[in-house]
Image: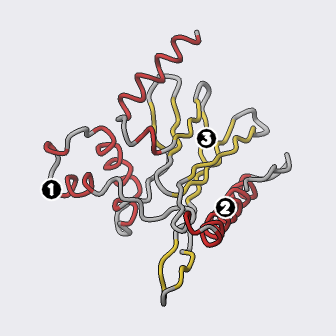
């Protein structure tokens, strides 16, 4: 469903195009599930991006995301920074500043064992893998499946010299901490040099 984009789009136009493509994919997945009984509750998460070169030679990463597929920046120093926020219980807290959510998400990503976390963080850890929205998600209303509205998250990030954008499925970040991913990625950087 993600279509080819014309070369000369503004950052806002690219983000709108990514968002529209994801909404179209959401609808297509839902409709496929309606037509194929064995796939009636088919769902997935998604992260997509386009990198734009600016007139001054800098680059911007334009990212769209739903669920717990993630975008990271691996900085030239080797540090890994999560850009997206998962659609989990933490993402549902409306009155918490994004900066605080990012810090809690970072702590949750590093916690292999919740026993050392305070009560609030422990609760979030236990619900960290419950995703509140996915592509294809529907609900049963009056004995009929109805597609759920989708809130596509978008991010417009400046990439510094040496930064690398990494898109990752939850199949990786569910099983590795950020520190473990950093080590693996830095091994590949070392092997490439």
| Left or right for 132, reference 13 | left
Depth check, mark 2 against mark 1: the one in front is: 2
Label 1 and label 3: CA atoms lie apart by: 36 Å
- From the viewer's perspective, is residue 159 above or below residue 153? above
The residue carrying mark 1 is 119
| Left or right for 66, reference 112 | right
Dividing the picture into quadrants, the one containing residue 164 is: top right
Of the numbered discs 1 and 3, the one sitting upstream in the chain is 1
Label 3 CA crowd tier, 10 Å (few <14, some 14–19, many 20+): some
Residue 105 visible to the viewer: yes
Depth check, mark 1 against mark 3: the one in front is: 1
- Which residue is nearer to you in this view: 115 or 54? 115
- Which residue is nearer to you in this view: 96 or 82? 82
The residue carrying mark 3 is 158
| Left or right for 98, reference 169 | left
- Which residue is nearer to you in this view: 92 or 52? 92
Judged from the image, the secondary structure of the residue bearing numbered disc 3 is strand
Label 2 and label 1: CA atoms lie apart by: 38 Å
- From the viewer's perspective, is residue 127 above or below residue 7? below
């Amino acid at each position: 469903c993600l279509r080819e984009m014309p070369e000369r789009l503004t950052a806002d136009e690219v983000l709108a195009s990514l968002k529209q493509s994801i909404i179209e994919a959401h609808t297509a997945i839902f409709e496929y599930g309606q037509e194929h009984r064995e796939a009636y509750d088919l769902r997935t998460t998604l992260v997509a991006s386009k990198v734009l070169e600016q007139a001054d030679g800098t680059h911007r990463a334009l990212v769209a995301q739903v669920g717990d597929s993630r975008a990271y920046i691996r900085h030239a120093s080797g540090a890994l920074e999560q850009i997206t926020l998962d659609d989990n219980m933490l993402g549902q807290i409306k009155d918490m500043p994004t900066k605080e959510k990012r810090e809690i998400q970072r702590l949750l990503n590093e916690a292999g064992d919740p026993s050392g976390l305070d009560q609030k963080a422990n609760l979030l850890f236990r619900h960290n893998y419950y995703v509140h929205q996915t592509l294809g998600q529907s609900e049963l209303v009056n004995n009929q499946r109805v597609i759920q509205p989708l809130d596509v998250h978008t991010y417009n990030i400046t990439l510094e010299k040496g930064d690398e954008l990494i898109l990752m499925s939850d199949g990786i970040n569910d099983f590795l901490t950020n520190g473990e991913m950093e080590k693996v990625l830095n091994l590949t950087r070392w092997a490439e040099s």
